[in-house]
Image: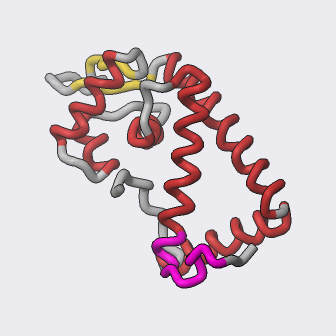
Amino acid sequence: MNGDDGLDDLELAFKLGLAFQLLISEFTARGAEAGYGDLRPVHGLAFQALGAEGATSSELAQRLGVTKQAAGQIVDYLERHGYVERRPHPEGGRRKLVVLTSTALVHLRVAGRILQSLEAELGDRIGAAELGDLHAILGDLIRALTDGGPLPPLRPVW
């Protein structure tokens, strides 16, 4: 599949970035077709960062690597659209726990199916063995870059 498209001359970081951008763009388009046009990639990262237990806005900011103000804006947006709700924190005080709603949980199931479909289509286009090799190589690359330590959270750095 090599060609005169200039890809062979690009550095690894650019190739990884372009592949991620193209995959996320297609994922976002399919999510919109499935009725989730109000969500962007950062919202999916917020869902993952909140997890099953929820988090405070400050904890969300730390997990996403954004300011508290940015996390607050994300939470406000997701709350207005019915994906999260603020509840009293179990430890009391003024803090609020941000938790996913059933709407968000349904979206996560739909998003998982979309990602599985995209991956299957990629396997059809480049070959199942090549896709398996890519998985293994990327896993090796991540392990090398983390020196085998814990995985960092995926953060919206784009």
Q: From the top left corner, tell me how far across and down residue 50 is, in percent.
A: 41, 36
The colour scheme used to paint the residues is: secondary structure
Query: Vertically, is 46 above or below 11?
Result: above
Q: Please state, as top left, top right, bottom left or bottom right, where the C terminus lies in the image.
A: bottom left
Residue range in magenta is 4-15
Q: Is residue 125 left or right of residue 97?
A: right
Q: From the top left corner, tell me how far across and down residue 145 is, in percent.
A: 48, 78
The residue sitting at 34% across, 34% down in the picture is 55
User: Which residue, as the protein is rendered here, is positioned at the far bottom?
Assistant: 9
Query: Vertically, is 113 above or below 64?
Result: above
Residue 128 lies in what quarter of the image?
bottom right
- The one of 65 and 117 positioned closer to us in this rendering: 117
The residue sitting at 46% across, 18% down in the picture is 101
User: Which residue, as the protein is rendered here, is positioned at the far front?
Assistant: 4
Q: Is residue 91 left or right of residue 108?
A: left
The residue sitting at 33% across, 49% down in the picture is 63
